[in-house]
Image (cartoon, grey):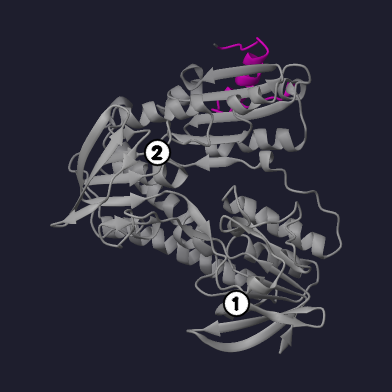
Amino acid sequence: MDKFDLIVVGGGPGGYVAALRAAQLGKSVAVVESTHLGGICLNWGCIPTKALLRASELNHQLHNLAEFGFSAEKVSFDLEKVVARSRAVSRQLSRGVSGLLKKAKVKVFDGRAKLAGRDGNEHVVSVSKEGAEVTRIAAPDVILATGARARHFPGLEPDGELVWTYREAMVPKELPKRLLVIGSGAIGVEFASFYRNMGAEVTIAEVADRIMIAEDAEISAMAQKAFEKQGIKVLTGAKVGPLNKKDGTVSTQITTASGSHDLVVDKVILAVGIVGNVEDLGLEKTKVKIDKTHIIVDEFCRTGEPGLWAIGDVAGAPWLAHKASHEGVICVEKIAGHDPEPLHPLNIPGCTYSRPQVASVGLTEEKAKATGRKLKIGRFPFMANGKALAMGEPDGLTKTIFDAETGELLGAHMIGAEVTEMIQGYVIARTSELTEAELKETVFPHPTISETMHESVLAAWGGALHF
């Protein structure tokens, strides 16, 4: 039985980063991965969807050239090539992860991992392939980074043909003319944007009273208005009835406060959340506690079982690749005897790559008010920003929320072009505990859309210069 200092179960953005950091710290490391290095994010999530979205944005731009003084005739696309490019990007990066682990001398085991008891102070992990055990390995510390999968509800089960999860939605063989997206989180609205940009008729059905419920309500309302302007039909407070399949189409009845809506579509995409992959890991004989399919951990990702740790999606919200990676580093440094800073959830940025993009960090206005603090709130519209106008992207807003007494940046919320690239400025401000004083004194380059960030801060304190 091979022995290591650390075993990582799962090779996604949490697992492989944890393994690389452990190798940097001189640990002997094994990674057990059953499917593909890079995990869902790299292979079936973050990366390939961005490649698809980029293609769809180009399609949209090619059909909207007039304001820039251009014209184009017979614009068309080859969907097979669009999808092929997306898959090629994923393969390239997956090979890159494999190369990084090999360079770091991390041993990768192809198979499924299951805890198989202890050997002294070491956890024993059984590695199986196609149901048969192929080897056993052991280490004093094991990190569970098994990720999550799409949530299903009775009556809304996917079939891979007419009713899709994110996997099928990323590799369409043909473009559906009519599409229903159930759920309006980041996954749902990104697919809605992709298919609408490619020419499909899209309907979003959301059970909550507004879309993108995790975002600030003002930003959520702006996003819905933008989607509807593009021709996406948005139904909130929506209860979707059973999905009836007949003659290659799906029919359903959606009930809202305004009444019932009968809908017939070619495809349905389910984007109603995720559940953690906690099954068949051998957790039954451990002190690990599970709440709603997610492993309970402390601020350093320790479970209730000594030497057993959990990171990423399997350890609960927020379900973000960058959260998983950062947890991997914190976890490994704690194992190595270092003194890492715990991850502060309110300093984790959220990004949605729809058209328009949405990005945020910290508290929403509603949650900031709930703290009882006196607030100062600044807003600056993209329509007053020179770079946004020059780019033909005047629709957007940067919103900042401060504690009126201390100047602490409580939250920042952005909607518009390229905001996912800019939110990091506010993340740095929160991580560094900067106040409005430092942000006011920061020099932002001109002309850039990032100037809306500065102006929003100034606006919170009554000093916006250009609006």
Q: Is residue 122 above or below residue 268?
A: below
In the picture, the quarter occupied by the N terminus is bottom right
Residue 331 appears in view:
yes
Does 381 sit left or right of 372 as displayed? Answer: left
As helix, strand or loop, the secondary structure at mark 1 comes to: strand
Which is more N-terminal, label 1 or label 2? 1
Quadrant of residue 257 within the rendered picture: top left
Does 85 sit left or right of 401 as displayed? Answer: left
Q: CA distance from mark 2 to mark 1?
A: 37 Å
Stretch in magenta: 441-466
**Badge 2 is on which residue?**
207
Is residue 365 shown in magenta? no
Q: Label 2: few (<14), some or many (≥20) within 10 Å?
A: some
Q: Is residue 461 above or below residue 191?
A: above
Q: Position of residue 447 (x, y in %)?
A: 55, 25
In the picture, the quarter occupied by the C terminus is top right
As helix, strand or loop, the secondary structure at mark 2 comes to: loop
> Which numbered disc covers residue 420?
none
Quadrant of residue 44 within the rendered picture: bottom left
Name the residue rendered at 27%, 55% in the picture: 79
